[in-house]
Amino acid sequence: MIGLVHYLVFAGILFCLGLFAVLTRRNAVTVLMGIELMLNAGNVNLVAFNRFVGSGVNGQIFALFIIVLAAAEAAVALAILLNIYRTYKHITVDEIHLLRG
Amino acid sequence: MLTAALICLLVPLAAFVVQLFLGTRLPRGGDFVSVGAIGASLLAACWIFWQVMAGGEPGYQWSMVFRWVEVEGFTIPMGLAIDTLTAWMLLVVVGVSFLVHVFSIGYMHGEDRYHLYFGYLSLFSFSMLWLVLSDNLLGIFVGWELVGVSSYLLIGFFFPKRSAALACKKAFLTNRVGDLGMWLGIMLVWKELGVLRLEQVYHHVGAGAFSSEATLTIAGVLLFVGAVGKSAQLPLHVWLPDAMEGPTPVSALIHAATMVAAGVYLVGRLFPILTPDALLVIAYVGALTAFFAATIAIVQDDIKRVLAYSTVSQLGYMMVGLGVGSYFGGLFHLTTHAAFKACLFLGSGSVIHAVHTQNIWEMGGLRKKMPITFATWVISTAAISGFPVLTNGFFSKERILGDAMGFGLHLPQHFLIFALPMVAAVITVFYMTRVTIVTFFGEPRDREKYEHAHEGGFEITAPLMVLSAITLLGFAYAGPFERMVTPPSSTDYAAEQFAAFHYGESLRTGALDESHGAHAAEAGRGEAAHEEPAHAETGAEHHEAPWGPHRVDAHSLHTGHRAVLYLSLLALILGVALATLIYHRKRSQEALARRFSGTWRVLYNKYFVDEAYQAGVVNPLLWLNRLSAAFDRVVIDGAVNGSATLTRALSSGSGWSDLRIIDGIVNGIASVTQVFGAAFRRVETGRIQHYFAFFLAGTLVLMLIRVY
């Protein structure tokens, strides 16, 4: 029987994978993809908690909002990346440290 | 009348302004502007004179008052007024001024600053007219000072010459001493009466508004001190001979005819308010001046200086006249003297212009070369000597001496007031004859200068001829003058007092009534008479007993005048004879000087008055100056330098603390910040993933804190 813990463990693994991708990948697009993974891990948590703990559909609606937000964020982030690419001719995040102190 | 008076007054001022700003640009230095202006003034003055004489009554004919200063509750009115005396004075001042302007065209030709000279002449004419036209003491004082300034400018006109610069300074400072006295007198009048308009002053004094007769005497004497300065009377006469450094026409205008007469004019104006004591002071000063100045004039070698001392002496006569109560004598002598002395000065100017020296011993025999100058000179000399009937000097001088003799006979303790001028009359004839002989007769002493000499142009000779004509016409205007110019009187009381007091008047009317005679005799017993309480107490008492002990009965007056006539004739003959004997017969002055070497030296050095002033006034002042300079240097400078040193010490202390302490703190903070900044900047790598890692670490730490 699949219970709440399974969902939470799954979401934790997903979040850690996303986090690993964000911290280690050098390609900015991959970093963005890591962020998407982390966001969706959060979504899984929201839906699972609603199913097992709360009542109604608040969690699901919250998840839908986050998906929409993630789409918007991705659009903005990709636009930024496009501009970075135009300037640097690459999107390797290691090399982009103009704001170094 | 208003228009005429304003034209008369303001046109010369306008000419001065024009000369000051445009003089250099006008053709001929703009001399026609000044001459034209004074000509317009002359026409206006003649018209005023005609109007006043047609009026036929003495006293104010016209007046105008405006408020000069108006502060809350305090007003100083200024005013112009014309009475008979003013009308005469206008004619004298403007007439002489006009002739001098004309003469100057020839005399000053080609001098530097020619336009300014004429500007200054215009300024002087304006000032003198202001003085004459003013109807109040303050206005007179303003004109008085303006006249002093223009005199200063004109004496110092040749200021590159050191002696001229010194002379104008001396004249100005000496006048200042007199002006101080006059100013104090004006303030005393203001304090006692609260008014300065002459009409009101006469009225108030007549009504007994002065707190005591002694105060009135003091006020009169103080005002007279001003006249002493301006009219070069005895203690303050020293500036006038030095003022001869100015151009000769200026000497004729200012230092013979008009400005120096201002003092006499002032005394004449104040005549109604002068007490017997004040008049006595005036008479003594005048008598001493007349005598001592005449003696000095005997030995001077400079033609202008002789005339200068002669002027001082003649001014003394005028003061004697006024002092003994001869209003007509004093003021008429002012008028006649203006004519013949201006003529003499212009004559000397003509001579100086011809031979280029002022030393009479370098002249001689000039009568052949300069006949017009010689003739006019002789006429004026006759006038100053009081040559009978033909000259105007006769009428004025005889009147003064006659009244003085009456005074002296009546009050024998004051006989000196008659004796000194009488002796001075002999001396006057003597020195004038001396100058005439040495300058115009005999053989030329300096052949080269003699050959060079020639009569000046028309503008030089015309004024001489006009002035000598006026001198000869004395008999024509002596009568009208005496009829018209009487002491101003604004109340019946004052009029009565004048009639009683002024015995020139009483001579004319022929007799004094019994009570007056008796009173005169009673009062005349001694000078102490008017110090008695009955005379000095209140205004009401004054009405009963007008102060006037100087009155004399008609008999002694008539005797006086006839005797004086004989005495004067004697003086004339004696003077001419002595001078001719000594100077015509080629007995040189040196021989005489050797015989009376002591007297000669005293006279030649003008009684050492200048030296006395140098030792008694100037040197102590210089010592005082040096003392205060030393005080300045040691004490004041010491204090200043000390405080400067102290400030410097304090400043260097606070500077040190600024540098070390304040700057230290500021720099310390800055370097601490720098160290920290250098340490922390390594955190800011600019790599997004590092920030992410920090963020994660921070979140983990927060979570750990939350858990435990």
Image (cartoon, coloured by chain):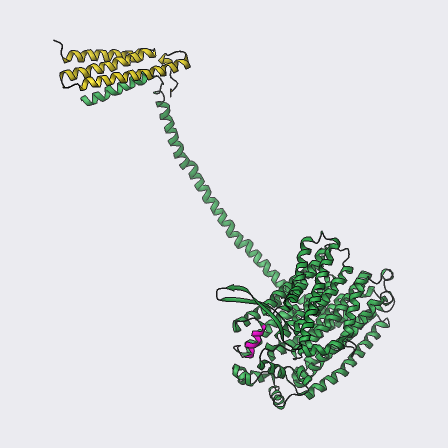
**B392 relative to B461, above or below:** below
- As for residue B549 lying within the magenta part, the answer is no
Asked which quadrant contains residue B413, the reply is bottom right
Residue B330 seen in the figure = yes
Rendered location of residue B482, percent (x, y): 69, 78
- Quadrant placement of the C terminus of chain B: top left
B108 or B560: which is nearer to us? B108
Chain appearing in yellow on the rendered image? A
Q: How many dots with numbers?
A: 0
Percent across and percent down for residue B647 are 47, 46
Residue B615 visible, this orientation: no
Q: Main secondary structure of the magenta part?
A: helix
Tell me the magenta residue range: B198-211
Residue depicted at x 15% and y 15%? A51
Question: In the picture, which chain is green?
Answer: B
Tell me the residue at 71%/85% (across/down). B560
Q: Is residue B210 left or right of residue B269?
A: left
- Residue B592 at what x, y percent from top left? 81, 72
Judged from this view, the residue extending furthest toward the top is A1
Residue B566 position within the rendered picture, expressed as x and y whole percent measured from the top left: 77, 83
Q: Quadrant of residue B340?
A: bottom right
The foreground one among B696 and B209 is: B209
Of the 4 image quadrants, the one containing the N terminus of chain B is bottom right
Q: Nearer the viewer, residue B185 or A93?
A: A93
